[in-house]
Image: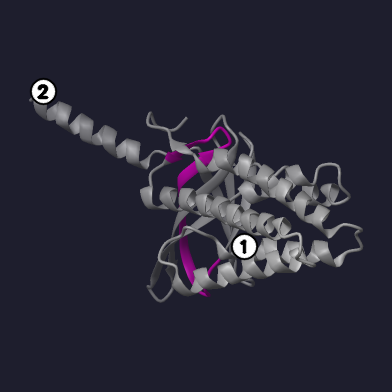
């Protein structure tokens, strides 16, 4: 009898471990029938600042159909942007909308999810949370893997772009290294889109850097090469900050 009770207790404990909330939970949700958006209020219940979270969502409709999908909120880009805009004219406007980009311990955040007409029930469970200290709580290995993969792809893309910029700068006979670097970066993104088999690069990141090069080179500057060097320095700084978040490891002892 004692063995049976112990087995039941262990099964019950395992179930609680799987179902217990992790570092953030959906506190409330509301459905706007006019816009077909569900607004979720999420609270950071951990003692650490959050950099990303993944939600498993189940929607039920009046016709009996059920839709299940996931939504990832990645905050690292906003965190980097807030740091880069410090001391600039754009800082105040950015902070009004996004603060410092971090989902702080004890704080709340509203998340909007588009749904179809006729929603009758909505369920959302947060199953992955990553933190500013480079750790994570996860009950969804695939989603956790995607977060890490996408962050590593962003870093790899920035490194590719930096290599193209440095190569263009190294050619002292090139009259327009900005145009050369931008073209090579965009070409690399195009090749990746046509032939990729895994998420080892992010073409959106590549194209964004190429467009930034074009904007920088279109301004009035006595030295376009200096503008390229400043961009290299900025992206190398971004890589340094991103590396901490890309090396995120799962807390093995359960939610922190």
The stretch drawn in magenta includes residue 120: yes
Q: Quick one: SS at disc 2?
A: helix
Q: Colour scheme in the image?
A: one colour
Marks 1 and 2, how far apart at CA: 62 Å
Counting residues from the start of the chain, the first of labels 1 and 2 encountered is 2
Q: Name the residue under label 1.
A: 206
Residue 191: x %, y % from top left = 52, 72
Q: Are there few (<14), some (14-19), or many (20+) residues within 10 Å of tag 2?
A: few
Which is nearer the eye, 100 or 201? 201
Q: Which numbered circle lies on residue 97? A: none
| Displayed quadrant of residue 244 | top right
Q: Quick one: SS at disc 1?
A: helix
Position of 225 with respect to 104 (left or right) is: right
Which is nearer the eye, 244 or 138? 244
Stretch of the chain drawn in magenta: 114-137
Residue 131: x %, y % from top left = 55, 37
Return the residue found at the far front. 173
Secondary structure mostly seen in magenta is strand
Position of 146 with respect to 9 (left or right) is: right
Q: Indicate whether 247 appears above or below 178.
A: above
Identify which residue is drawn at 58% across, 40% down. Answer: 50
The mark closer to the camera, 1 or 2, is: 1
Q: Name the residue under label 2.
A: 2
Identify which residue is drawn at 80% across, 65% down. Answer: 215
Identify which residue is drawn at 27% across, 36% down. Answer: 14
Which is nearer the eye, 192 or 170? 170
Does residue 207 appear anywhere in the picture?
A: yes
Identify which residue is drawn at 62% across, 60% down. Answer: 205
Q: Quadrant of the N terminus?
A: top left
Residue 225: x %, y % from top left = 80, 56
Q: Are marks 1 and 2 in contact (CB under 8 Å)?
A: no
């Amino acid at each position: 009898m004692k063995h049976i009770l112990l087995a039941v207790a262990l099964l019950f404990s395992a179930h609680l471990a799987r179902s217990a909330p992790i570092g953030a939970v959906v506190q409330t949700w509301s459905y706007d029938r006019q816009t077909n958006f569900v607004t979720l209020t999420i609270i950071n219940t951990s003692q650490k600042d959050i950099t990303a979270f993944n939600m498993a969502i189940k929607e039920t409709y009046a016709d009996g159909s059920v839709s299940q999908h996931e939504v990832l909120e990645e905050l690292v880009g906003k965190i980097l942007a807030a740091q880069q805009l410090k001391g600039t004219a754009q800082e105040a406007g950015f902070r009004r909308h996004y603060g410092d980009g971090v989902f702080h311990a004890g704080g709340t955040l509203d998340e909007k999810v588009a749904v179809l007409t006729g929603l009758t029930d909505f369920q959302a469970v947060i199953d992955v949370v990553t933190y500013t200290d480079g750790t994570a709580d996860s009950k969804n290995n695939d989603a956790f893997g995607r977060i890490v993969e996408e962050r590593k792809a962003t870093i790899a893309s920035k490194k590719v772009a930096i290599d193209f910029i440095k190569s263009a700068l190294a050619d002292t006979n090139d009259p327009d290294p900005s145009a050369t670097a931008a073209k090579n970066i965009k070409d690399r993104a195009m090749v990746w889109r046509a032939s990729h088999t895994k998420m080892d690069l992010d073409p959106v990141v590549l194209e964004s850097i190429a467009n930034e090069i074009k904007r920088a080179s279109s301004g009035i500057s006595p030295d376009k090469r200096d503008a390229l060097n400043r961009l290299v320095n900025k992206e190398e700084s971004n890589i340094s900050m991103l590396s901490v978040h890309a090396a995120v490891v799962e807390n093995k002892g359960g939610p922190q």
